[in-house]
Image (cartoon, rainbow, N blue to C red):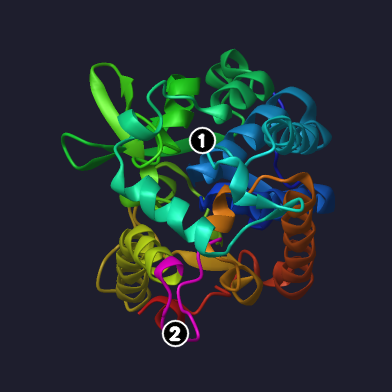
Amino acid sequence: MFRWRSQSNDNNTICLALQGGGSHGAFVWGVLDSLLEDQRLGVEGISGTSSGAINGALVANGLAEEGREGARRRLAAFWHAISEACHRRRRSWFAPQWFWRKGRFDLSSKGVFFDVMARMLLPYDFNPFNMNPLRHAIAETIDFDCLRASDSIKLFVNATNIRTNKNRVFTNGDISVDAICASSCLPFLFHPVEIDGQHYWDGGYMGNPAIYPLMYNCESSDIVLVQTNPVQIKDPPCSAGQILERISAISFTSVLMREMRAIKLISELMEEGHIKRRAGLRPIRMHMIEAADELGELDGTSRFHADRVYLDRLYELGRRTGSAWLEKNFDKIGSVATLDIEETFL
């Protein structure tokens, strides 16, 4: 099996934590494409939620079968498949025809109305046949037999168990189309995904993404968070769409913020000698790749926009951001954290 590892220095091996965020996952695609093209970093594990889980599975599958270029091709194939499905329907996933205006996403009052109605209606009313355009694209671009058999990358996919209110972490051995769809299951749009008698919603409610699987199951102390949801915003929301978006962002970021607090505390206690290093417990060097200003300016309904031009713009933003981050921070991997947890999350 191919193993995506640095050939020159094990200190260049990292873990990736990939946030979800609907079509904003195309930004993560661009970041990953820049990291794959650069070739200097190795990856031990990937934890992903929602579109982050999809991107993580595509990377893990592509690397296992065809190396870096194979991973890049799979990422591109998936996002192009999503845009083609959008073009065929001339709408954004479940958005009606009026949600479009001259080939661009309509973020006017009609768009906000759709967002509000989607939250008020049950998915059994709004989407009675449980149509999910992601399922086909996922099945077509990921070889799950290969992924389950591979140990080249440790993959962790997060979903929320509705009954127990706990995070379910799917690993390489039990990854499936259902597991990925469960991690991406927004309760206002899709019916819960049933796996082994349990029902699941989007993993973002329990961790977007969950960091602890990387801490407990991997050896690398460097974790790179690829962020699509800005933690901080410049101005308070004042419109219906902005309010709904901020409520969603706070909900999907709360668990991550608590994990960041725990990581900071544990790392400080270990550095001061108060607790000893053992399995699953070590100082963690956190890093973050984000485009908070650019993504923060987008309306919340833009997460459902899948037009090819729009996805390509997010991809190019991700590539530029990833390349700039590498140029600035590569030499610090393996030695110091580049994310100030206290300033960003606490």
Image check: 89 left or right of 144? right
Which residue occupies 54% across, 45% down? 52
* Residue 142 picture location, percent across and down: 64, 23
In the image: residue 129, left or right of residue 101: left
Residue 7 sits in quarter: top right
Tell me the tag on residue 155. 1
Compute the Cα span from label 1 to label 2. 29 Å
Q: Amino acid at mark 1?
A: Leu
Other residues around mark 1 within 10 Å, as few (<14) / some (14–19) / many (≥20): many
Does the magenta portion include 234? yes
- Residue 343: which disc? 2
Q: Dot 2: few (<14), some (14–19), or many (≥20) neighbours within 10 Å?
A: few
Q: Is residue 286 visible?
A: yes
Q: Nearer the viewer, residue 106 or 77?
A: 106
Which quadrant would the C terminus be assigned to in this image? bottom left
Magenta stretch, residue numbers: 228-241
- Label of residue 276 in the image: none
